Amino acid sequence: MKITLFWIGKTDEPYLRQGTELYESRIGKYLDFQAITIPDVRKGQMTPARQSELEATALLEKISPKDDIFLLDERGEMFSSTEMARFLEKKMLESTRNLVFVIGGPYGFHDKLYQRAQGTISLSRMTFSHQMVRLLFLEQLYRALTIIRGEPYHHA
């Protein structure tokens, strides 16, 4: 199985870039993994709704109709780390070819992404910056993979 993670815009803070690079390399040791940055679409003055629509269009151009898509959304289903591992393991057993996770921009997701997605996942009931979510999600993805393998990274 391949996992692709899409996010909108570059990661500004050096500490977040370092963290995301660290976990990307760790995840890559377990399976085919790719993080793809969709460039910011901000051009002059536009409404948040228009910006999220343009981001959705850019994302959908990069996603195959066969991909399983899950949006990281504050209203999504919450998993513990072990539940996330079970979710990934189930996708592996179902022979999912490409599992796609999407981190939206600052204004969230447009309806056409919700319509295309198979589900939504929340990291917390708290709100984090979309750049911080990148690092948090990558760490949880890595943690889930170590749980699946029975490795000692997760000590619960």
Image (cartoon, helix red, strand yellow):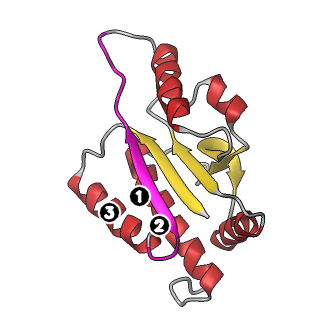
Q: Which element carries disc 2, helix, strand or loop?
A: helix
Q: Which element carries disc 3, helix, strand or loop?
A: helix
Q: Which element carries disc 1, helix, strand or loop?
A: helix
The amino acid at mark 3 is: Glu
Q: Residue at x 44, y 32 (%)?
A: 106
Figure check: 88 above or below 53: below
Query: Could you give the CA–CA distance between mark 3 and mark 1, rounded to whole angstroms?
Result: 9 Å
Q: Nearer the viewer, mark 2 or mark 3?
A: 3
Residue 77, percent from left and from top: 72, 51
Q: Where does the C terminus fall, quadrant-wise?
A: bottom right
Start and end of the magenta stretch?
29-44
Residue 14 figure quarter: bottom left
Figure check: 141 above or below 12: below
Residue 118, percent from left and from top: 73, 43
Q: Which residue is mark 3?
A: 21
User: Upstream in the sequence, badge 3 or badge 1?
Assistant: 3
Judged left or right of residue 21, residue 28 is right
